[in-house]
Image (tube, rainbow, N blue to C red):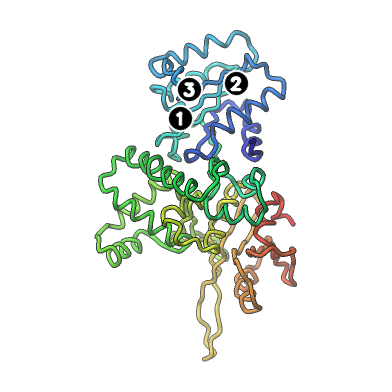
């Protein structure tokens, strides 16, 4: 079964011969090795690259342990470079190599090499890995499967695929599993024995139960405003545990650096400035969020919002939560300052989109509620409302587009419709 991951393949292709180390990051089991060793290598061969000019080494293979120490790997690669044509160096799980940063930086001094690496331990799970290469790294971040990628390999209807996707998420191995027990056990094992283990070992965390409980709180309140001070109060009132905001801020940073969660800051649309606190947190994968709660809170509306956020980021957008400040007239005739929320403000270069994730709009009152903050934005950027129903795209008198979630996720050009 071949899963197309064209958006990432094109990002690698666009970075060919740029003189930098292409560093493929992402949580474990999201498809980094598959992208590099199957899809990208296939591209190289199809575009006429001689197989002898592709040096690919899977470093977690027992046969390759000799490359782990000293300059063995460096000397081996240099011995394979016998002419002046470009050599493509593909290294999987490069963290196994002692002082791999020095070795890779050394390889960059060879003019006719193009270097691509992946890694899956706690060091490569960290978002600051590119700095290890002293400004010579170019990161390509891989997410779990998008819904479009998931559907392309799913055996069943789109409706069935959607339910499976928002329940078990997009880690590629999920597609090969046949029953609910197998999928849930897999996700639980990944979370406990891989992701958390890496974080705990890297940061030498002593109070593991605090981090564990923080993940549960974030999972339960996904897409809700919070900050370290509010979380500290939650621990005190609900868990009867005192944890300082400083400690919780540290934990949040660790979880973000490890790509398990991502923070969406508040952005004042009219004032054109960021409001630092509170913020919203979303999970890199819906299935990983759900397994934290033993699949007890699978509310489709919250999961849909998380999936929309991830889709926008996967498409390359910077995503914030929009705040629109208005003066609202009350019964007494006075005006009160009020803040309306836009779920997402998505920016990519000169492009901007304002997006509401509404799930359901059963009546005019709900439609008015979702449209109001969009109408109050006085610029010409496109405004979109996404709902969970399978509907035909429509545009109202204000120019606001309403479309179904599946059309948005399955059409890579949906934002342009």
Front in this rendered view, residue 37 or 1: 1
Q: Left or right? Give the position of 374 relative to 204.
A: right
Q: Left or right? Give the position of 261 relative to 87.
A: left
Counting residues from the N terminus, which is met first, the one under dot 2 or under dot 3?
A: 2
Q: Which residue is labeled 2 in the image?
A: 88
Q: Residue placed at 38% from the left, 17% from the top?
A: 69
Q: Which mark is residue 134?
A: 1
| 316 w.r.t. 202: above or below | below
Front in this rendered view, residue 154 or 222: 154
| 397 w.r.t. 354: above or below | below
Q: Which is more foreground, mark 3 or mark 1? A: 3
- Please, what secondary structure does the residue beneath circle 1 have? loop
Q: Residue placed at 62% from the left, 46% from the top?
A: 150
The answer for how far apart the CA atoms under marks 3 and 1 are is 11 Å
Q: Quadrant of residue 1?
A: top right
Q: Position of residue 144 (x, y in %)?
A: 54, 44
**The C terminus - image quarter:** bottom right
Q: Position of residue 101 (x, y in %)?
A: 43, 25
Q: Which is more foreground, mark 2 or mark 3? A: 2
Counting residues from the N terminus, which is met first, the one under dot 3 or under dot 1?
A: 3
Q: Which residue is labeled 3 in the image?
A: 104
- Local crowd at mark 3 within 10 Å, few (<14), some, or many (≥20)? many
- Please, what secondary structure does the residue beneath circle 3 have? helix
- Local crowd at mark 2 within 10 Å, few (<14), some, or many (≥20)? many
Q: Residue placed at 35% from the left, 50% from the top?
A: 251
Counting residues from the N terminus, which is met first, the one under dot 1 or under dot 2?
A: 2
């Amino acid at each position: 079964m071949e899963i197309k991951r064209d958006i990432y393949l094109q990002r690698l292709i666009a970075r060919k011969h740029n003189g930098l180390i292409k560093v493929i990051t992402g949580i474990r089991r999201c498809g980094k090795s598959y992208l590099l060793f199957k899809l990208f290598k296939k591209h190289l061969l199809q575009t006429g690259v001689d197989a002898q000019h592709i040096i690919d080494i899977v470093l977690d293979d027992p046969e390759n342990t000799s490359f782990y120490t000293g300059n063995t790997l460096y000397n081996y690669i240099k011995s394979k470079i016998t002419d002046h044509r470009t050599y493509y160096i593909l290294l999987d799980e490069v963290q196994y190599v002692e002082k791999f940063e020095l070795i890779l930086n050394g390889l960059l001094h060879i003019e006719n090499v193009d270097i691509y690496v992946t890694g899956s331990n706690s060091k490569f799970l960290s978002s600051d890995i590119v700095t290890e290469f002293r400004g010579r790294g170019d990161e390509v971040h891989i997410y779990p499967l998008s819904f479009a990628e998931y559907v392309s390999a799913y055996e069943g209807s789109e409706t069935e695929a959607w339910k499976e996707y928002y329940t078990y998420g997009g880690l590629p191995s999920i597609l090969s599993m046949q029953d609910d027990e197998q999928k849930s056990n897999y996700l639980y094992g990944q979370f406990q024995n891989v992701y958390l283990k890496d974080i705990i070992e890297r940061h030498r965390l002593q109070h593991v139960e605090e981090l564990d409980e923080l993940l549960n709180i974030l999972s339960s309140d996904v897409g809700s405003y919070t900050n370290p001070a509010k979380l500290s109060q939650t621990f005190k009132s609900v868990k009867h545990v005192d944890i300082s905001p400083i400690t919780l801020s540290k934990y949040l940073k660790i979880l973000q650096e490890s790509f398990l969660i991502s923070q969406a800051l508040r952005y004042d649309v009219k004032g054109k400035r960021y409001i630092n606190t509170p913020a919203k947190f979303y999970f890199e994968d819906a299935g990983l969020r759900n397994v934290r709660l033993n699949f007890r809170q699978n509310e489709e509306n919250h999961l849909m919002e998380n999936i929309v956020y991830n889709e926008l980021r996967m498409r390359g957008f910077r995503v914030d939560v929009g705040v629109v400040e208005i003066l609202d007239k009350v019964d007494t005739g006075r005006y009160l300052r009020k803040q309306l929320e836009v779920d997402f403000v998505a920016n990519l270069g000169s492009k901007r989109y304002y997006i509401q994730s509404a799930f359901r709009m059963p009546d005019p009152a709900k439609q008015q509620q979702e449209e109001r903050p969009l109408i109050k934005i006085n610029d010409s950027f496109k405004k979109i409302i996404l709902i969970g129903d399978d509907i035909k795209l429509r545009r109202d008198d204000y120019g606001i587009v309403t479309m179904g979630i599946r059309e948005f996720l399955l059409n890579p050009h949906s934002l342009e419709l």
